[in-house]
Image (cartoon, rainbow, N blue to C red):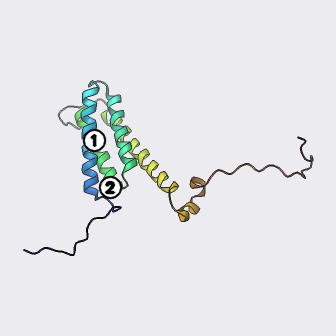
Amino acid sequence: MSVDRDQEAGTYGERTPAGISVAVGWAVMVGTVLLGAAVFPPVDLPARALLVAVAAGAYAALVADLRAVAAVTALAMATFVGFLAHRFGELTGGGGAWTYAALIAFAAVLGTGYRRLRAMASADGQEASRYPSVVGPRTSVVAPPDDAPDGPRAA
């Protein structure tokens, strides 16, 4: 048995592997679903959906990997429909549970958009020159020149 001593050690700033991001996100979503089941009664689907949507949106705002965000959002939607809206993991049935699950996807899209805008705003000078309307300060309105046809304004 030999040991490969040329392996590179992990350094700060490396991207988190997608599998780790999905596992952490899945654990957060399971915890959120358990919290929703404990706090809200079974007939209060909008509140349960809102709780899971807030968690999905926050996760999407914090995680840069879009594959992990998509996987966790899909799992969160399926868990909401299967265990909070219906019982025993059933993903079919009436009650409009998938309509509420669309709120979870929308929150994830908003979280991803927030992350992208935040990344553009904190970008270096080269990025700032490409997106001046997002990064740059607002310009003030220019006053008319003093030699306008109606003359300078009296103070």
Label 2: how many Cα within 10 Å (few below 14, some 14–19, many 20+): some
137 vs 94, left or right, is right
Nearer the camera: disc 2 or disc 1: 1
Determine contact: label 2, label 1, CB under 8 Å: no
SS at mark 1 in the image: helix
Residue in view at x 36 percent, y 38 percent:
53
Give the residue at mark 1: 29
Q: Along the line of sight, which residue is nearer the eye, 27 or 3?
A: 3
- Is the residue 47 above or below the residue 123 in the image? above
- Is the residue 146 above or below the residue 40 in the image? below
Question: Dividing the image into 4 quarters, which one contains the C terminus?
Answer: top right
Give residue 34's quadrant in the image. Answer: top left
Tell me the distance, in whole angstroms, between the alpha carbons under discs 2 and 1. Answer: 16 Å
Q: Amino acid at mark 1?
A: Met
Q: Position of residue 89 (x, y in %)?
A: 19, 37
Residue 28 seen in render: yes
Q: Position of residue 60 (x, y in %)?
A: 37, 48
93 vs 57, left or right, is left
52 vs 134, left or right, is left
Q: Amino acid at mark 2?
A: Arg
Q: Position of residue 123 (x, y in %)?
A: 50, 59
Residue in view at x 89 percent, y 44 percent:
153
Give residue 92's quadrant in the image. Answer: top left
Question: Dividing the image into 4 quarters, which one contains the N terminus?
Answer: bottom left
Q: Position of residue 35 (x, y in %)?
A: 26, 32
Mark sitting earlier along the chain (2/1):
1
Give the residue at mark 2: 67
Label 1: how many Cα within 10 Å (few below 14, some 14–19, many 20+): many
Residue 105 seen in render: no
Instruction: Residue 78: give its label.
Output: none
